[in-house]
Amino acid sequence: MRPEAEQLRVAIDKARKQKHTLRSRTIVENLSLEEAYAIQAIRSQDRPIKGYKLGLLSPAKQKQMNIDQPIYGRIFPEMVMESPISLSSFIQPRVEPEIALILQSDVPEDASPGEAARAIGGFFLGVDILDSVWEGYTFTIAEVVADNTSGGGFILGEHLLPAFPTGHLRLFLNDRLLAEGPVEVLGNPEERLQWLARNVGGLRQGQVVFLGSPAAAHPAQPGTLRVECNHFSLIARLTS
């Protein structure tokens, strides 16, 4: 790893601990995606992996960021949170509704579509609490990957869904609709698992995978957060 990339890793760790932001391109101007994933991996060393989150799923968003595939980040056990959740533990939190799955068996690096499908133990409604170290969420694609794809916290619903949901996923705060989008834009979950397993060297039984959001993220505020889809709901309390 180049010295500049190592300098960025140290800066991100410091910003996370001290809860302050960094300005894009002020540390490394030409960070590569390969270096960014290397930074993410080093920052994850000796930590148990609870699962992964996917981002930038749509071709339109990928084109905007000049990439041709999704991105991923790691989820650590302490990042899966239970209500009530204090927003003071984050730097600049935003929330978006998601669908998550849990694995009932391993997914090898070279898994077939059938192996990936059989590994899925069920689906849940979820919330991704984004939290970026980059000021105003202004960053390059490599910078957001190095920052673990803005991974802050995650909420999992209590109810196992009977199948991968259809229709619209909606996010409410204090009964006000914040965001919504069609679940179909998340793509095929088995294909997403195959892609992820290839890129991380396989997935493990019990891990959780957040499949991304069909809706835009919004700044988090204290109150009651609710996600709805297919007559199922997730409710969590956010405090200051």
Image (tube, rainbow, N blue to C red):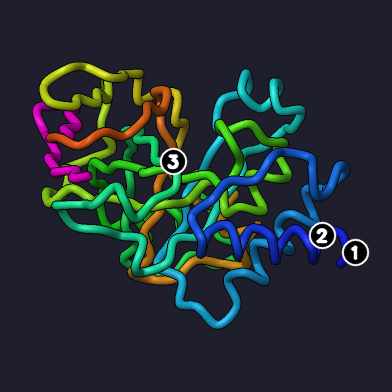
Residue 235 position in % (x across, y down): 12, 40
Kindly identify the amino acid type of the residue bearing the numbered disc 2: Ala
Query: Quarter holding the N terminus?
Result: bottom right
Q: Which residue reaches farthest bottom?
A: 46
The answer to if 161 sits in the magenta stretch is no
Q: Nearer the viewer, mark 1 or mark 3?
A: 3
Residue 132 position in % (x across, y down): 53, 44
Q: Please tell me whether residue 6 is drawn above or below residue 59 in the rendered image.
A: below
Disc 3 element: loop
Q: Please tell me whether residue 112 is drawn above or below residue 59 in the rendered image.
A: below
- Residue at (14% x, 52% y) in the render: 84
Residue 61 position in % (x across, y down): 61, 23
Residue 6 position in % (x across, y down): 79, 66
How far separated are the C-alphas under marks 2 and 3?
Answer: 24 Å
- Residue at (75% x, 58% y) in the render: 8
Dot 3 corresponds to which residue?
92
Query: Quarter holding the C terminus?
Result: top left
- Residue at (72% x, 36% y) in the render: 140
Kindly identify the amino acid type of the residue bearing the numbered disc 3: Gln
Q: Nearer the viewer, mark 2 or mark 3?
A: 3
Residue in the foreground of this view, choosing between 28 and 36: 28
Dot 1 corresponds to which residue?
2
Residue bounds of the magenta highlight: 224-240
Dot 2 corresponds to which residue?
5
Kindly identify the amino acid type of the residue bearing the numbered disc 1: Arg
